[in-house]
Amino acid sequence: MINLPIDQATFLSEYWQKKPLLIKGGLANFQNPLSPEELAGLSLEEEVESRIVVQKSKDDYQLLNGPFDESTYQNLPEKDWTLLVQGVNKLVPDVAELLNEFSLIPNWRIDDIMVSYATEGGNVGPHYDHYDVFLLQAQGKRQWQLTSQNCNLNNYIEGVDLRLMEKFVVEDDYVCEPGDILYIPPIWGHHGIGLTDDCMTFSIGYRSYKGLEVWDSFGDYLAETDDFKTLYQDPDWSNSEPGQISDDSWKQAQTLLKGVLDNDQLFKQWFGRFATQLDAGSSQQLPEPLAEDEIDDIEMLVDTLSNLATCSAIQIDPVCRFAYYEDDEEATNQEIRLYINSANWNTFGAESDFIKLLCNQTIIPAEQLQPYLKNDGNQKLLNDLWLLQFFEIA
């Protein structure tokens, strides 16, 4: 867990989604698991989302979209450019492990880890985002300037590929060194400038949900499950005109929609799927299921997991999203729901504590796993996930 300068409750109540916080030495013993050369190597791959931003003058930025090749880097200037690679946690297991340090809120809220490398002066311009982010300085130094002013759609520099803020009134100015973390809430302007030629920053970004996105998702769920069949009921037409839409007319439609919105059970079932939904890019990165000739019986899998010589831990695939829902603290096996990648998953009668373990930890050491291997339901659930390669055996 990151070393907050305040207690977690204070951070969540006074800072989360409200105001920035500089966390000096947030990960004091942090060892960068990724070199600049390895990051550049990822940007050469077709399936990896990458960008390079070159600052040519004060308000002139050039945006290049990957995949790149070696000649791209040979033609870059010595200074004033930044490489950004998205979703590195899905590509590099050691980067994925970092997410365990940021468990201040449920992990299904995390989007991904973007890693940037900047030369001296490298930056992507002053801008604001609609999501929460922790900016972990991995190596080198970066200056961060922040503002709460003029963070609106009308404040932008025209003629630039990036949406950058034209007016940027600096309210806070920090320098981050390796292990430092800067938390920035949504709609806060920020401008990060590389102060050294080896500047690397890990951006742990969280999902943001627009109201329309939530509304559309719930509507799609109702259409898919065919759960909303209630008919519109006419109001009293006794005082209406032939062409009139009365207040009672639209209020009846409002009542109809409120009825489904107030259905707690339906909403719970939908939200578990919504919270674990993968974006289109992540869906393409899911592991390939085992081929038919690779499948062994469940007893062999359990034997492998039970033997410390063949299993030291299991690691959940970093692309997958696991979450659970339980109605109360005394939930039984029938009352706990498991959601994986936007699906209401068959638990096979697995123990509640085991389902929670799968959702709460991305890496489960053998010592924690083994006590659960004697349960038939746990075995069946593990086998189901293994066939889909949703976890690896270390």
Image (cartoon, rainbow, N blue to C red):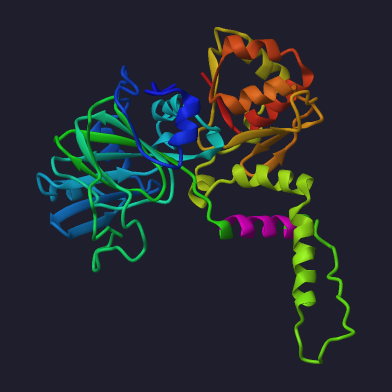
Place of residue 184 in the rendered image (x, y in percent of width and height, measured from the top left): 37, 41
- Vertical placement of residue 69 versus 253, above or below: above
Total residue callouts: 0
Picture residue at 30% right of the left edge, 45% below the top? 84
Secondary structure mostly seen in the magenta stretch: helix
Which quadrant of the view contains residue 118? top left
In what quadrant of the picture does the N terminus appear?
Answer: top left
- Does 105 sit above or below residue 266? above
Q: Is 52 placed left or right of 131 in the picture?
A: left
| In magenta segment, residue 61 | no
Q: Can residue 70 be seen at all in this image of the molecule?
A: no
The residue at the point 9 percent across, 44 percent down is 78
Would residue 132 appear left or right of 138 to someone viewing this image?
right
Lateral position of residue 208 relative to residue 73, left or right: right
The residue sitting at 13% across, 51% down in the picture is 75
The answer to whether residue 90 is above or below residue 154 is above
Q: Residue most toward the left?
A: 78
Picture coordinates of residue 229, whole percent (x, y): 84, 62
Identify the residue shown where x is 50% and y is 43%. Answer: 285
Residue in the foreground of this view, choosing between 250 and 68:
250
Q: Nearer the viewer, residue 22 or 178?
A: 22
Q: Which residues are magenta?
A: 213-223
- Relative to the observer, which residue lies in front, 141 or 361? 141
The percent coordinates of residue 289 (x first, y second) are 60, 37
Q: Residue furthest front?
A: 239
User: Percent from the top left, x then y, of residue 331?
Assistant: 78, 26
From the viewer's side, name the closer residue of 351 and 123: 123
Residue 160 placement: quadrant: bottom left
- Residue 30 in view, yes or no: yes
